[in-house]
Image (tube, helix red, strand yellow):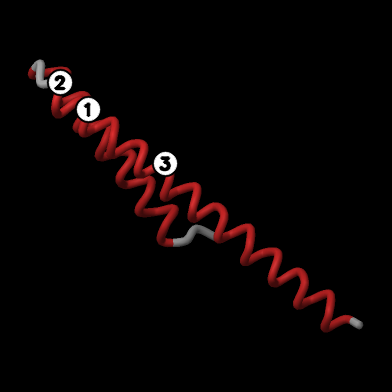
Amino acid sequence: MINKNQVHGAVKNIAGKVQEEAGKLVGNKEQQAKGIQKQVSGKAEERLGDAKEVVKHAREAVKDAVAKH
């Protein structure tokens, strides 16, 4: 399942790519840098979402294991 951090991160990443490319197109290095920064932020948020999913699944596995015994 996908959580909100994964979705928000992916959106930031895509927006950053668009901003970076727009900066390249018009020759604006500041916009390119902001786009790259947004991509890094988006990727970090996606990884946070991934980590939350791992913890959620581990918690569910432990809960199921305890319930069986």
Q: Position of residue 38 (x, y in %)?
A: 28, 39
- x 57%, y 54%: residue: 51
Q: Position of residue 53 (x, y in %)?
A: 58, 60
In 3D space, how far apart are the residues under numbered discs 1 and 3 (Cα atoms)?
Answer: 15 Å
User: Label 1 belongs to which residue?
Assistant: 33
Give neighbour class at mark 2: few <14, some 14-19, many 20+ (Cα, 10 Å).
Answer: some
Q: Amino acid at mark 2?
A: Lys
Q: Mark 2 and mark 3 in contact (Cβ < 8 Å)?
A: no
- x 38%, y 48%: residue: 9
The circle drawn on residue 29 is 2
Q: Quadrant of residue 39?
A: top left
Q: Residue furthest right?
A: 69
Whether residue 5 sits left or right of residue 37 in the image: it is right
Q: Mark 2 and mark 1 in contact (Cβ < 8 Å)?
A: yes
State which tag comes first along the sequence, 3 or 2. 2
Whether residue 58 sits left or right of residue 15 in the image: it is right
Asked if 11 appears above or below 28 in the picture, the reply is: below
Whether residue 1 sits left or right of residue 66 in the image: it is left
